[in-house]
Structures are given as C-alpha cells and as structure tokens.
Image (tube, rainbow, N blue to C red):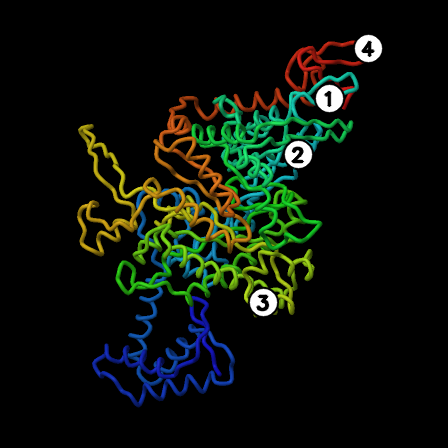
Amino acid sequence: MLKVEKRNGNVVDFEQDKIKIAIEKAMKETDKGIDEEVSQKIASEVFEELKNKELVDIEDIQDLVEFSLMKYRPEVAKKYILYRQERTKLREKGWDMTALQRDIYDKKYRYDGESFNDFLTRVSGGNEYIKKAIKDKKFMPAGRILAGRGLDKLGRKITLSNCYVMPKVEDSIESIFDTAKYLARTYSYGGGCGVNISKLRPKGARVNNAALTTTGSVSFMDLFSLVTGLIGMRGRRGALMLNMDSSHPDIEEFINVKNDLDKVTYANISVNVDDEFMKAVKNDTEYDLHFTVEANGQEIHKKVRAKELFEKLAYNNWNDAEPGILFKDRIDSWHLMSEFDDFEFAGVNPCAEEPLPAFGSCNLSSINISNFVKYPFKEDAYFDFEDFKVAVKHGVRFLNGVLDENAELHPLKEQREVAKNLRQIGLGLMGVADMFIKLGIRYGSDESIELIKKIGRVMINEALRESAMLAKKDGPFPMYREKEFLASKFLQKNADPDVIELIKEHGIRNSQLLTMAPTGSISTLLGCSNGVEPIFQISYTRKTESLNNEDTYYKVYTEIVREYMDAHGIRDEEDLPDFIITSKDLDYKDRILVQSAWQEFIDASISSTCNVPNEFTVEQVEELYMFAWEKGLKGVTIYRDGCQRAGILISNNKKSTKEKIDELQGEIDALAKNALAENPDVCPMCGGKMNHSGGCRECQDCGYSPCSI
C-alpha cells in the first residue's frame, strides 16, 4: 500500500480523499467556487502518478496537485500556492522569546546571525522530524550540538559532545600532567571533563627507600582546577568533576578541601561511596581506608568510624553544597555493559548523569516530555504515549547520526577510538514537573510514580528497539558480545520479550542509551522545567530601573504556573491547587522516590540536585543520603538555600578577566615548573626548599626525593 512521509517524519497511509478536500478548500476561496468533478479528477491523477511507489514525500504530492491545478483551474492554483507559502512561513517562524531566552539563543547557540530556520536546519542536520520537534519545543539537542553542528565545514574545531571522562590518574608525575594536558585540549574543543584521582598515593605514603613521603592526592586537585579556570577565562567552556573513592586514605581531606574558599574553585567534587561504606554507616561500624602503592608495594590501612566520616560528608554538602555523593556499586551494576569483564567506568561527567569509561564521551539530547500532554490543564488531559514513542525512536536515530558526524571531531585520538567502539548516546527528558502540572498530578505522589514507571518502560524499550533496528542496518557496536550483553540485569529487568528477540537477531547499535541531564540552558530556552527536577519556585521578584533611577519591583510567575493561572483565570497564587508544589515545599523522600522510579529505566544516570530550605538540618542530609542509597539512586547532591556556597556564588569579584587569566596562568606555570623539576631548588610536591646531598635532592618539608620515583 502507498505510504506518505510527513514533514515530522511520521509515515502514514496515502488517502486520496485528503487531496480532494485540500483542493476544494482552495476552490472555495475563488469566485467560481467548488467543482467536485475537477477536484476528484485531480486527486485521481495524483494517485495514478504515484500508485506504483512504496513511499512518497508530502511535498511531492503537493507539487503534483499544484501542476494539475495549473491545467484545470489556474485561479485555484494561485490560491493553493499562496496557501503553501503561508504554511511555510508559519513553519519557519521563530519562537516568541523572553529577554533571557533571546540572550541564550543569540549568545550560546545561534551562529553568525543565522535565521531561525537556518538554525533549525543546521542543528537537525536536515532531519525534518527533528527540525519540527525542535520548533514545537518537543525535543532539544544538548548545547554542544546546538552551538557546533555543521561548523566543522567552516574549519571550526568544536566537538559535538558535551563532556568526557579522563582515565583514572595514575600514580606518577607523568600521568598527572598528561591528565592536565588532556583536560586543556578537551576544553579547547568545548567539552567538560570528569577525573577520578583515587589511584594517586595518599598523603604520607613513601616515595623512596628512606621513607620520605608525598603530600598526597588532594594536593594535585588545584592543578586540574586551575587548568579548567584558565581555559574557561579564555572563552572556552571549562567544566570539571573531580571524584575520589570513599576507601581512599585521603578521603577526609578530599571531603574538606573546599572549606578553604580559595581551593579547587573551578571544579565540582563528589565522593564514590561503596555499599560496604553505607552498610558500615547504617550499622555504625568501622570502615577500612586502604591503598597499595604499586611502585613499592607499600600497604596503607586506616580504620575509621564510618558514621563519623559520613557526618563530615553530609555537613560539607549542607554547608558548601559539595561534595556530592555517587553510589559506586549501583553505578557499576545497573547498566547494559555490566557483565563485560573488559569494561569499567573511569568516572562521571561534570554533572554526573553520565558514568563513562576512560576517554568516554557524552552525546546528549532531551525530549521535553511536558509537550506530549494533550488537553493540558483540563480534566481530560492525558499523556500521548504513541507520539512519545515516535519521539524516542527519532531521538535515538538522531543521536546516532550525530555520533557518526562527530567521529573525527573529538579532541583526542583515544576519545575517537572509544566513541567508535562503544557508540554511547544519552537520550533524556526535561519538563517532568511541567508534565505533572499539566496533568493535574502532584510531583512525588503515588500517581506520579505510577506514570513515571509507565513512561520509563516505554522509553527504554523504544530506545532498545530502535538501536537494534539500526544494528540490523549498520551492525552492532564493535565491542558487542551477545552473551554478556543479554546477561545484563538492567536489560533482563526492563526489556520486553520481543525486544530481547530483536537484539538476539541483530545485536544492538549502542552500548548506552538513556540518561537524564540537568538541561539548564536548553530547558530555560524552551521555557520548561529542567531535567527531572520539581519547579524551583512559584514566582520571583524582578527589578527594573526607570529613567529617573527609581527601582520598580514586580512579580514574575514561573512559566508553567503562569500558563496554569491563565488557563483557569487565577489572579492570585494563593488560589493555586495543592498539586503545584515547589522543590522547597516537597518532602525530600518524595523527591528521592521520583528519581528512583526514573533510575529503574535509565541505563546511565541522573543529574540530581535536591534543593532544600535553609532550615534543612545536617541530620536530614544524612537521612536523605541513606534513603537515596536504599532506593537505588546512582548519585545525588543537595543545595541548601542560604548555604555558604550561595554567598560565594553571588559575591562580586572585581578583578578583570585579564587579571584573572594572568593570575591563573602564573599559578599553573609555577605548579608545572615545580612538578617537572625545572627548578631544582623547589620541591615539585609541596613547593618547599630542596636540599642537595649524596648526589640527589630531597625536600626539607615533605621528604620528597626524585631519586625515589
């Protein structure tokens, strides 16, 4: 049967009557009016022309109609042409944007004054479904794709991946500075980075046979942070996540490092806690911090009371909004590659939604799930699962296209190899809170959890199905092995029987499929809630300054709240229903339950910040962390309103950009010079004075000697 591909990518049956109706609509606009005999004749001619084809484009059909009208009714053809032109104009019309949205669009994503339609064409790669989905605010690629797609043809060195993970830093000066070099190169292409420093020997470990000691792993965090800051100041995007295993002997120093407000200012930090640690916290027992120095076999062990360490972690997150917490064993066990012995995660990206192997990369896009609600704000509102399935299918297909296009655009050769061998993508969601409001469902309620599970199961199965169909066409990802892949507990729990059979038959194109990014800028651009988070506030106060310098303050409602109020004729927020709830009013357990429900169906991870009120206690942070672990989250952090970090973020640093660059460059140069021992009188480990004796040198402060490396 003849099929028609519509502009949104959907394929439907050819219907001759639709052509007749469209022609008669144009005829109605003319003096002669409708001639059913002619409209039927043209519809039949179009069908005869196309009947031997399997698939035709909607534009081809309209071209044939236009040609036939020119023969039989030229005056109708003119009306029909004008109709098509008006429809084209409507399709090409840009969004209505606020000043903030326009600023994001113009400064972050729009290239060289391109028109909105050119922007859509460039970003979508000419994919008509994706182009329309972006225009309809149903789908949005991540920032690197928006900013960089197509610019390689103009000679620009811009990766389409938002983020990367470096190999775990090995216990040597060479590896430390190789990592700094990798970071700088990756930042220069626009990618953020994650680095695990757990392999660096702890403070006090021997570095030679005379029992001289090192300043430890934490001392190198500032180097990586400064590289990030310097590249960011020079106009490139610098974002860094540093993490350390909970069992590392330096873990307490790592947890406390940001208590010094001048330390590690250009990186986020997180602790990788294992199940053993969480069980020790729960049972209030001791926990073993341990490290083996590979160079000399030294074994370092330190027993700590797990609960005390946990309390320090919770206090710092309460006070500084860092470090976040990552649940290592859940990360390692709940994904599609969990049973591959030759695969392991090296760390997470800066926002922690993507656990990745060494040199792995993020390839991200998000579906605005709130725009799949039909009849929003009404009693008969419902979620359109069929429309959503189509979006997931096209999202997977789109990201595979971007993956291929980005194959040679990664900054490092090793990153190109990993992307080729694993083909990891990250399709996610945003607008979750808005969706619930449109449906009249309270965020965190039993009804919301039930809906999440229905959507999540549909999403993972559609993604797996489309990836398997791509494997049928192009082959599975190079590292794919059927036995290990099918043994994944994540796959076994979530995949429908027909999907399993499809994978058995064709393999699968991608080793990673779903994620939940924070979607900060892109959700603001679309005017929807970010990621899986609840809405932050009902309204906020905006200030404007008049010509006579008098400040005027006025209330601005969050977009979804304003839409609800307009739909129901509400003028005062006091009249809003109880199901519209903000992050500060939400019970933290409900917030965790929402994330837990999504994580069941997400093979990567979820970027998560629990915004809590100022009165939230340290003990409640501990309870939140424990509950998150018990509910199977892969990671979480909190941001307490009014915490110390808030003051830092809003402080007014009056140094110029040039002064900051010069200052950072000086600090990096000094660190590099010392560590590479270009100055024989300065210790590369702590900056202390080196004493020369016995044909070698040793530091009088920390005991470092180059002869022991």
Residue 245 in percent (x, y) is at 61, 35
Whether residue 335 appears in this view of the structure is yes
Q: From the viewer's perspective, is residue 462 above or below residue 449?
A: below
Tell me how far mark 2 sits from mark 4, CA to CA.
32 Å
Tell me how far mark 3 sits from mark 2, CA to CA.
38 Å
Front position in the image: 193 or 637: 637
Tag 3–tag 2 contact (CB < 8 Å): no
Whether residue 154 appears in this view of the structure is no
Nearest to the eye among marks 1 and 2: give it.
Answer: 1
Residue 319 in percent (x, y) is at 43, 28
Q: Pick out the residue farthest to the bottom.
A: 37
Query: To which residue does mark 3 refer?
Result: 469
Tag 2–tag 4 contact (CB < 8 Å): no
Question: Between disc 2 and disc 4, whose residue precedes?
Answer: 2
Q: Can you tell which mark lies on residue 694? A: 4
- For badge 2, the amino acid type reads Val
Question: Between disc 4 and disc 1, whose residue precedes?
Answer: 1
Tag 4–tag 3 contact (CB < 8 Å): no
Graded by Cα atoms within 10 Å as few (under 14), some (14 to 19) or many (20 or more), the crowding at tag 4 reads few
Q: From the viewer's perspective, is residue 665 above or below residue 357?
A: above
Query: To which residue does mark 1 refer?
Result: 206
SS under mark 4? loop
- For badge 3, the amino acid type reads Met
Q: Can you tell which mark lies on residue 21? A: none
Left or right: 357 as drawn, with respect to 88: right
Tell me how far mark 4 sits from mark 3, CA to CA.
68 Å
Residue 365 in percent (x, y) is at 48, 53
Q: Can you tell which mark lies on residue 169? A: 2
